[in-house]
Amino acid sequence: MSISSENLSGTVVARPRGRIDYEASTGFQKDLELLVTQARESGSALLVSCAEVSYVSSAGLRAFLVIARAAKSAGVEFAVCALGPTVQDVFEVSGFSRLIRVLEKESDLRA
Amino acid sequence: MANLVDELVLLAVEDDGRISHTAGTNAFRLALIGAALIDLSFRGRLDADLHNIRVMSVEKTGVPPLDLVIGRLSLGQAQSCESTVLSLYEVSDTLVRLTLQSLIDQGILGRTEKQLFWVFNERRYPVVYGVEQTEAKVRILTTLRGDQLPTPHDTVLIGLARTGGLLEGFMSDAEINRLTDRLNLVGGVDLIARGVEMAIYADNLSRAQTLMFMG
């Protein structure tokens, strides 16, 4: 699992790639926590684009929840987008997609 | 810090130390097994996806109730969450007994000859490493009445308390009804917790069918 990120006109966009399972979840969470801090300091929103995420396990889902909580308590607008069918199923069955903002594509955040 | 198994059992212990009748229900027992599996997943012993629980390590945790469950799993085992929970039902009595003993060992509960009691004469946990963890009922009510996102631990606690029939022990029907939307939103946001719900549903269905055939 790897993450790239960029700041696009008031939005920090994180683009994880690969599987977010137990083995990857700790690193994923730490990287995203840094981006929450970056977003707070720059007054930006944080968008996690999951187009290249192939798998999210129960542990990966928890990491997303921790990040969503961190963003909320930091006053950072948070959303995920571009979920593939497998990841979308995980978010829907678990109920996570009701708890956070899920967008179809990156440009929807400011739409 | 109290784990999920501890907290589910504590929710079944009344303020005066009596064990709630809920603790004898199948729903509670299955929820407790689910709690043990999730505690094990927090400790890196297993992970789950939409289809299976995958056992990654059977190394003991040093927590007797969790080691009871890990002892029943096989390394590399991949089985649906629902089947895993149902297959562990037979250890649920032992799981309750070991958890009560663990709570006594942790100094949260005490035991006289006749019954249990809360060591601090109220629903409180001891301070561990300078940190006092807020008791489960208080955390559940704070999460349900507020608008914060729950922690991974607390979303599962709320979901399992609900499916295990424990909320009725400290919330009125009116309050549960009033907070249904919030319960649906923040309770059990976890793949294993969803599997536990399915196991309880399957168990209820199976028992209802048995009763229909007998009737």
Image: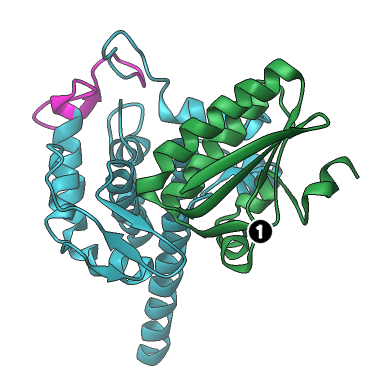
What is the drawing colour of chain A? green
Q: Tell me the residue that label 1 is attached to.
A: A83
Reply above or below: B80 against B100: below
- Decide whether residue B24 is among the magenta residues: no
Query: Predominant secondary structure in magenta?
Result: loop
* Residue pictured at 77% horizontal, 20% vertical: A43
In magenta, the rendered stretch is: B104-124
- Report whether residue B109 is seen: yes
- Report whether residue B97 is seen: no
Disc 1 secondary structure class: loop
Colour mapping used in the image: by chain
Residue B45 in the image: state x and y as whole percent.
24, 49
Reply above or below: B123 against B151: above
Relative horizontal placement of residue B11, taking residue A92 as reference (left or right): left
Label the cyan chain with its letter.
B
> Where the N terminus of chain B falls, by quadrant?
top left
Viewer-closest of B209 and B53? B53
Reply above or below: A34 against A52: above
Give residue B175's quadrant in the image: top right
Relative horizontal placement of residue B152, taking residue A97 as reference (left or right): left
Looking at the image, the residue that sits furthest to the right is A111
* Residue type indicated by callout 1: Leu
Residue B19 in the image: state x and y as whole percent.
28, 40
**Chain of the residue under the numbered disc 1 shown in the image:** A
* Residue pictured at 21% horizontal, 47% vertical: B96
- Decide whether residue B107 is among the magenta residues: yes
* Residue pictured at 64% horizontal, 22% vertical: A38
Residue B79 in the image: state x and y as whole percent.
30, 71
Relative horizontal placement of residue B138, taking residue B199 as reference (left or right): right
Viewer-closest of B182 and A19? A19
* Residue pictured at 36% horizontal, 65% vertical: B81
